[in-house]
Image (cartoon, helix red, strand yellow):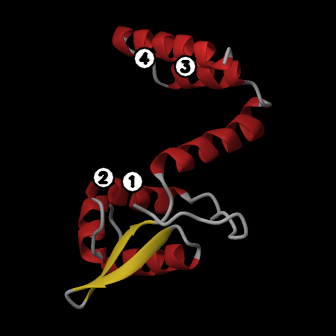
Amino acid sequence: MPPKRTETESVPPLPTAGELDILAVLWRLGPATVREVHEAVNKEIGYTTTLKQMQVMLDKKLVIRSERFRSHVYEAGIPKGQTQSRIVGDLLVRAFEGSAARLVMGALSAKPASKGELNEIRRMIDEFEKGMGR
């Protein structure tokens, strides 16, 4: 689990697309070496590119590094849910004029949801509305 940040510590920047690919691997695998991340990212980039990108991410505090059996082991420095919320918030403001409805319609237009997913979305909206009354 990533360490908690105090209010005086700056929030890491939003990850780039490539950084998000690496974070997705770390969220899925947990702590991993550069080699393990590189193999899991499954892109046409060299190992040294992955290594350099992870070093940059370390400087940005997007990942944390420890040493295990003489190997550097990396793990996500930011929680998945928090990162997703920040990305959606940024997208909401920049591309959808702050409209949650437009964001949802944009998402559904880009990739139609199955009947099961629509039912899950309705359930989550109902749950959200109940929580607002507290």
| Horizontal relation, residue 118 to residue 99: left or right | left
Label 1 with label 2: CB-CB less than 8 Å: yes
Task: Name the residue carrying label 4.
Answer: 113
Task: Name the residue carrying label 3.
Answer: 109
Closest to the observer: 19 or 2? 2
Q: Residue 56, position in %: x, y?
A: 53, 78
What label does residue 24 carry, if any?
A: 1
Where disc 1 sits, the SS reads: helix
Find the residue positioned furthest to the bottom.
Answer: 70
| Horizontal relation, residue 10 to residue 20: left or right | right
The amino acid type, in three-letter code, at marker 4 is Ala
Q: CA distance from mark 3 to mark 2?
A: 27 Å
- Pointer 3 or 2: first along the chain: 2
Where disc 4 sits, the SS reads: loop
What label does residue 97 carry, if any?
A: none
Q: Nearer the viewer, mark 3 or mark 2?
A: 2
Label 2 with label 4: CB-CB less than 8 Å: no
Where disc 3 sits, the SS reads: helix
